[in-house]
Amino acid sequence: MRPRQLALFAAVVASTVGSSASASSFSLDQPVYAADSAPARKPLMAALDRVGLAQPLEDNGISISGVIEGSWSHGLTSPANGIIAGHSFDFEHDDPTLNQIYVAVEKTTDYKKAWDIGGKMAWTYGGDARFIHSNGLLDHERGDRQIDLTELYGEVVVPVGNGLKLKFGKFITPLGFEYVNPSLNAFYSHSFIFGIVPYSHTGVLGSYAIDDNWTVSAGLSRGWDQSLEDNNDSIDFIGSVGFTKDDISSALSFTVGPELADNNGDYRVAIDWWFSAQLSEQWTASVNADYIWEQNSGQDGDASDVFGVAGYLNYAVCKYATLNARVEWFCDTNRAAGADTAVYELTFGSTFTPFADNELGSNLKIRPEIRFDIADDPVFDGGTDDSQTVFAIDAYFTF
């Protein structure tokens, strides 16, 4: 489980402060909501076009893009030590945050083009970078704002059947429905199950397009959030099966391997599944489920498991606004993730695009939300309460 989420839960219970999915063009992309449509050229590429640089880049399949995000969260119960328990990036009570300045340079590849070469380099600067470092890569930084080399990989299409993409380097995990990149999510806050899957892998991943609907992926990595250094001497296996057709998309992903520090014998198995359906021009419904099992890592020394499911409903009111709802059940009775209880979450929010008709302004999104967390045991507010209510708002601008 992610050390960051474990630390947040465990630290709050002790009243002290502790310390998405990789998308393919065929099947692993999340749906784009109608209200979130944007101009073909983002501001950065439009600016490059003014000096004659955008078209040569686009002719070679290269794009440069980014996101800047800021936020503010408020726990209505004034949480102990200013920590909103169990939350991922929105855990700081009444502390305005520059979450991210994210910049990516990417050359996409095409399954149908033999020996097509591409790759991606992405950097993240801000508060969120504190939690997404991989082992041995900029992970000794200090301070509220840090920098992270989020992705760095090359990719080549091998002419096997319908095309085999080989990706090698550091890449974001295929597990999970929600992403670190805020522009790919409906909410500012993240689900609890977002916090129990890895952020990235360093290794090699092959993806094969069976047909226009199905893709399969398989690969090897150094482990969960490992890169230039490894916390043990073992590798893990990554696999995914993705499907998309018309208004339906889904993916089943998993990892298997030892993940504990200095431990090559105790295996961890993580299984993630999500399904999304565009029900109409306005309605989208999605579900995400995770199950993780690990040898000898429970609080009693036996095997542990942690699991949960989250459901999403989105309604595009108009080009200016989308309404969003998320409901979740998360269970960790072995204290594998630090909670030692079952937790429930209900979040209501909206995404506003106040300048939807403006080519530049349409890239600005504002997302207020209200979130209710309830647990079977008192794990919130320094271990004194079994519920918490959080109001949060963020704004991000894609460029």
Image (tube, rainbow, N blue to C red):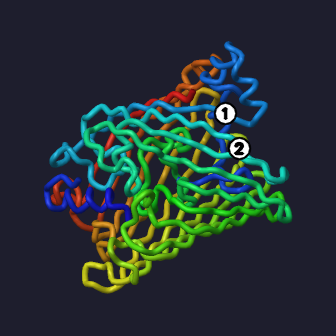
Q: Is residue 143 above or below residue 18?
A: above
Amino acid beneath label 2: Thr
Residue at the (34%, 50%) spot, across then down? 139
Quarter of the figure with the N terminus? bottom left
Is residue 154 or residue 195 the one in the foreground?
A: 154
Could you say where residue 255 lies in the image, as x and y percent from the top left? 53, 71
Q: Earlier in the sequence, mark 1 or mark 2?
A: 1
In front of the other: 137 or 251: 137
Up-down: is 182 above or below 354?
Answer: below
Q: Are marks 1 and 2 in contact (CB under 8 Å)?
A: yes
Give the alpha-carbon distance from disc 1 to disc 2, as whole Å: 9 Å
Q: Which residue is mark 2?
A: 108
Callout 2 secondary element? loop
Label 1 residue SS: strand
Residue 378 screen position, x and y as percent: 21, 63
Q: Quadrant of residue 319?
A: top right
Tell me: residue 286, above or below residue 294. Answer: above
Q: Residue at x 36, y 79 (%)?
A: 304
Q: Examine the rendering and report whether any part of residue 328 can be seen.
A: no
Q: Quadrant of residue 274?
A: bottom right
Instruction: Answer left or right for 331 relative to 36.
Output: left
Q: Residue at x 28, y 71 (%)?
A: 340
Furthest residue to the bottom?
302
Location of the C terminus (image quadrant): top right
The amino acid marked with disc number 1 is Ser
In the picture, the disc for residue 63 is 1
Q: Where, by quadrant of the figure, is residue 2 drawn?
A: bottom left
What percent of the width, then of the height, locates residue 90? 34, 44
